[in-house]
C-alpha cells in the first residue's frame, strides 16, 4: 500500500504542478509550460521568416500531430509515469539500500553554481547520446524509435515527435548520470532544461544553421537533418549524428557525417510507409510483430 500511495501522490503532485504552471502560479523562470510555448513560437517565427527549405509549407506535413506529441510527451506522460519512477526508486532503496547518491563520483554541491550547471549539462547529454545510439543499434529499441524517424518534413515540433516508450528508455541512463554527480539536479537546472529545449527545437527546425566553428560543440539543424536521412552511408549502417545537444560526442567517436548543406535530403527510413499515420496509431506502434 505504501508504494501505491507514493505512486498516486506523485502523479497527483505533477498534475497539480502542471495546472499551476498553466495558471502562472509558478515563477516564470521555472514555468516549463509557458516556456515551451514561447520557445516554440519564437523558433516557428524564425522558420517562417528565414525558411531553409522554401517549398515547405508553414503548416507542414504532420504539423498538428507534432504539436500533440509535444504536449503529450512533455507534460501528460510525465503525470502518468512519475509515480512509477518514485515507487521504483523506493523499492530499489528498500531492497538494496541504493540511494540517489550511492555511486557519486563527485559531490556536485561543493562546486560553484556555474560549474554545477556545466557538469550537469555535459554529463546528462553524454548519457542521452549513448541512449540514442542504443536505440539505433538494438532492433527491439529501434522499433519504437522509428516513430521519430517517420517524420518526413522537419519543423521545430518534430523535436517531440517520438514514441512514449522513449520517455522510459532515456530515464535509466539519465538517472545513472545524475547519480554519478551526487544524485541531484543543480538549483538552477531549469536553465539547462530551457537550453536543451531550444537546441532541440532548432535542430529539427526549417532553419539553416551550423554555428560556424561551434558546430563541433553544439548540435545544429544541418547536422541533425542528416541524422534523419532515409539513406545510410556504407560506413554508417546504423545511422550518423546521434547528438542531442552536444555534437562533440559524434566528432570524438567518429559518428559525424555531413555530406552536404543543401537541405534537400530525403527523410525517413526504409519501409516507413508501414508506419501508422495517426497519433493514436503511433502510440501502439512497435508492440506487434512486423513493426
Image: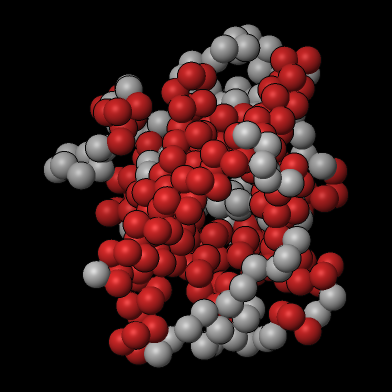
- Quadrant of the rendered image containing residue 134: bottom left
* Picture coordinates of residue 275, whole percent (x, y): 30, 29
The residue positioned farthest toward the left in the image shown: 289
- Colouring: secondary structure
The image shows residue 84, relative to residue 258, as above or below, that is: below
- Quadrant of the rendered image containing residue 59: top right
Q: Quick check: 233 left or right of 7?
A: right
* Picture coordinates of residue 194, whole percent (x, y): 70, 47
What residue is drawn where x is 82% and y is 50%?
214
What residue is drawn where x is 16% and y is 42%?
288
What residue is drawn where x is 70% and y is 24%?
41
- Residue 228 visible in the snapshot: no
The image shows residue 251, relative to residue 15, as above or below, that is: below
* Picture coordinates of residue 280, whole percent (x, y): 30, 28
Q: Quadrant of the N terminus?
A: bottom left
The image shows residue 243, relative to residue 290, as above or below, that is: below
- Residue 155 visible in the snapshot: yes
* Picture coordinates of residue 264, whole percent (x, y): 60, 22
- 22 and 275: which one is in front? 22
Amino acid at each position: 500500500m505504501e508504494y501505491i500511495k507514493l505512486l498516486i501522490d506523485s502523479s497527483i503532485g505533477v498534475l497539480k504542478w502542471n495546472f499551476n504552471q498553466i495558471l502562472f502560479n509558478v515563477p516564470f523562470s521555472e514555468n516549463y509550460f509557458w516556456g515551451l510555448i514561447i520557445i516554440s513560437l519564437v523558433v516557428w517565427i524564425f522558420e517562417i521568416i528565414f525558411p531553409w527549405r522554401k517549398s515547405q509549407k508553414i503548416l507542414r506535413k504532420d504539423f498538428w500531430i507534432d504539436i500533440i506529441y509535444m504536449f503529450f510527451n512533455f507534460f501528460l506522460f510525465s503525470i502518468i509515469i512519475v509515480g512509477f519512477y518514485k515507487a521504483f526508486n523506493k523499492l530499489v532503496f528498500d531492497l538494496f539500500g541504493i540511494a540517489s547518491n550511492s555511486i557519486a563520483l563527485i559531490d556536485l554541491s561543493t562546486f560553484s553554481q556555474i560549474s554545477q550547471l556545466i557538469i550537469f549539462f555535459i554529463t546528462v547529454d553524454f548519457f542521452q547520446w549513448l541512449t540514442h545510439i542504443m536505440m539505433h543499434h538494438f532492433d527491439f529499441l529501434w522499433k519504437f524509435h522509428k516513430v521519430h524517424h517517420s517524420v518526413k518534413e522537419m519543423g521545430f515540433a518534430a523535436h517531440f515527435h517520438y514514441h512514449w516508450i522513449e520517455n522510459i528508455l532515456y530515464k535509466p541512463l539519465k538517472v545513472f548520470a545524475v547519480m554519478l554527480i551526487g544524485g541531484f539536479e543543480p538549483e538552477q537546472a531549469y536553465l539547462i532544461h530551457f537550453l536543451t529545449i531550444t537546441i532541440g527545437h532548432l535542430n529539427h527546425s526549417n532553419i539553416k544553421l551550423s554555428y560556424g566553428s561551434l558546430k563541433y560543440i553544439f548540435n545544429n539543424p544541418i547536422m541533425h537533418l542528416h541524422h534523419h536521412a532515409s539513406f545510410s552511408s556504407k560506413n554508417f549502417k546504423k545511422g550518423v549524428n546521434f547528438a542531442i545537444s552536444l555534437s562533440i560526442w559524434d566528432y570524438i567517436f567518429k559518428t559525424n557525417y555531413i555530406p552536404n548543406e543543401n537541405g534537400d535530403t530525403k527523410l525517413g527510413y526504409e519501409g516507413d510507409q508501414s508506419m501508422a499515420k495517426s497519433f493514436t496509431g503511433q502510440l501502439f506502434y512497435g508492440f506487434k510483430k512486423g513493426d
